[in-house]
Amino acid sequence: MADMFDKLDGMVMHYQEVMNMLSEPDVANDNNRFRALMKEQSDLAPIVETYKAYKENKQNVEDSLQMLEEESDEEMRELAKEELAESRAALEELEQKLKIALLPKDPNDDKNVVVEIRGGAGGDEAALFAAEIYRMYVHYAEGRGWKIETIEMEETGIGGMKHVSFMVSGQGAYSILKYESGVHRVQRVPATESGGRIHTSTITVAVMPEADEIDVPDIDEKDIKIDVMRASGNGGQCVNTTDSAVRLTHLPTGIVIYSQTEKSQLQNKNKAFALLRTKLYDIELQKAQDERSEATLSQIGTGDRSEKIRTYNFPQGRVTDHRINLTLYKLDKIMDGDIQEILDALITADQAKKLANMNEAS
């Protein structure tokens, strides 16, 4: 515990140093340094404010205890007891917040994300469900004011999607959406089912932090095969009269990326390379996670993309997240993007598990 408060005292001192630097004229004229310091100030401010509230409540506890020792008036003693109880409760809550704030932070948490959805078992029904989950995430992101940009998409022609990749840009996007990676299962009666039998289909969701040249510094041109072609719509219908679509094949990994959402070949090429960097970075992250058994044990679920994480049962109108045994009976709202309750529960459970592991280690 002493180590925690020493760390907090150091953070308060550093926060003041950052605030002082932000007021210096040479920093104001250096955009890169100013932005970096503003980011640091923004990250530190909530912790500093929580610590300030903690110390205020700790002082209130001490003052109330002293009053109980010295005060003989019964009415004043009752008042001191009430204040003592309130301050102790606040102290406990603030201490928990500080512990969570000091948990090791995922370096990718502030990044934008690339979400990839692929139909799994179930054929056309899986593709239809993939399209619905895509719309669920789009509605959720729009509700938060995040930006959505489609990278690649393969539609089935009946309203489904074999796969779709899209970028979500927004504050803390990866820290929130990373819990969505895994297998999502749907149980319902397909529109084509004449016997009224419930079918089970699956899709796979992968949430990857956006990578840049720093994360993946070198992609050897010899390892890339580039094909250009005309973009096409469903059923091969030509929707472009120029060779604007780009297909990248990364020979060492076999990763194939097809981009046709932009009007120019250069724009599609840039999008394809951005997605390739993200996928290569994600491969490295998965390798590192597999090598760190402690990291795997400290998170909700196994972290394996093949893990079944959630079931959407349409006949019962329920959604169940299997990692935290959470069941909600508001399927319609969830499919319309109302997934914050699930995400909040996952974040809370993840933090609790990490705190428990940290306490065991200490």
Image (cartoon, helix red, strand yellow):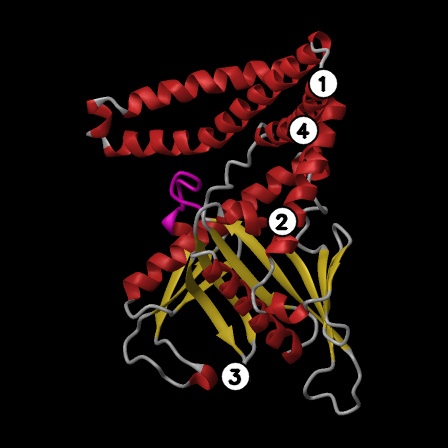
Q: Which mark is residue 60?
A: none
Closer to the chain start, of discs 3 and 4, is 4
Closer to the chain start, of discs 3 and 2, is 3
Q: Give the range drawn in magenta.
A: 211-221
- Mark 3 is surrounded, within 10 Å at the Cα level, by few (under 14), some (14 to 19) or many (20 or more) other residues, namely few
Q: Distance between the residues labelled 3 and 2?
A: 35 Å
Q: According to the image, label 4 marks what residue? A: 86
Q: In this view, does 110 lie above or below 52?
A: below
Report whether 291 appears left or right of 238. right
Which of discs 2 and 4 lies nearer the camera? The answer is: 4
- Residue at the top extreme? 70
Quarter of the image where one finds residue 216? top left
Q: Is residue 31 above or below residue 322?
A: above
> Residue visible at 71% across and 26% down?
85
Q: How far apart are marks 1 and 2 (CA)?
A: 40 Å
Quadrant holding the N terminus? top right
> Residue visible at 59% across and 66% down?
118
- Mark 1 is surrounded, within 10 Å at the Cα level, by few (under 14), some (14 to 19) or many (20 or more) other residues, namely some
Q: According to the image, label 2 marks what residue? A: 344
Q: According to the image, label 3 marks what residue? A: 157
Report whether 162 appears left or right of 142. right
Amino acid tagged 3: Gly
Amino acid tagged 1: Arg
Closer to the chain start, of discs 1 and 3, is 1
Q: Is mark 3 on a helix, strand or loop?
A: loop
> What is the chief secondary structure element of the magenta stretch?
loop
Could you tell me if the residues under marks 1 and 3 are in contact, i.e. CB atoms within 8 Å? no
Which of discs 3 and 4 lies nearer the camera? The answer is: 4
Q: According to the image, label 1 marks what residue? A: 77
Q: Which of 84 and 69 is in front in this view?
A: 69
